[in-house]
Amino acid sequence: MAAPASIGSKASLSDALALLPPLQLYRRVLRVHRKLDPEMRVLGDSYVKAEFRAHRSVENPLHIIGFLTEWQLYAQKLEGDNWAGEKLDKSKLDKMSDQQLGQLYELLEAIRNKDGENK
């Protein structure tokens, strides 16, 4: 699997072969979402579907490798149960576009609204 630091290096092409193909990764993420609370699963599944749909026509190899790497790391964290309460890495935040930050904020608001309804 390609480590985030190796993306863009000459070794990343050979490392990328260890990444799951997009459809298999998509299915894996949806399967791992089964362990979430029903409301969080619906939210997560809709987000995953939208992201994979939005990236269907991307042709930039570095972007594809980064996208698949991050989703594979996400699936591994959810499978391992050590993700709860984990903070987003500042270096990843710094690399995000304004659109990505907006999406992250919308996701945060959706989670807060869900939590506020249950309390």
Image (cartoon, helix red, strand yellow):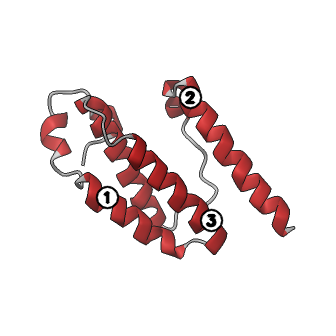
Task: From the top left corner, tell me how far across and down residue 113 is, in percent.
Answer: 78, 55
Label 3 sits on what residue type? Met
Residue placed furthest toward the right: 119
Q: Is residue 101 left or right of residue 31?
A: right
Q: Residue at x 71, y 52 (%)?
A: 110
Q: Nearer the viewer, residue 55 or 112?
A: 55
Q: Residue at x 64, y 56 (%)?
A: 85
Earlier residue among tags 2 and 3: 3
Label 2 neighbourhood size at 10 Å, few (<14), some (14-19), many (20+)? few
Cβ atoms under marks 3 and 1 closer than 8 Å: no
| Rendered-image quadrant of the C terminus | bottom right
Please give the label number shown on residue 99.
2
Cβ atoms under marks 2 and 3 closer than 8 Å: no
For label 1, the residue is 25
Spatial CA distance of label 2 from label 3 is 23 Å
Label 2 sits on what residue type? Gln
Spatial CA distance of label 3 from label 1 is 19 Å
Task: From the top left corner, tell me how far across and down residue 11 is, in percent.
Answer: 15, 34
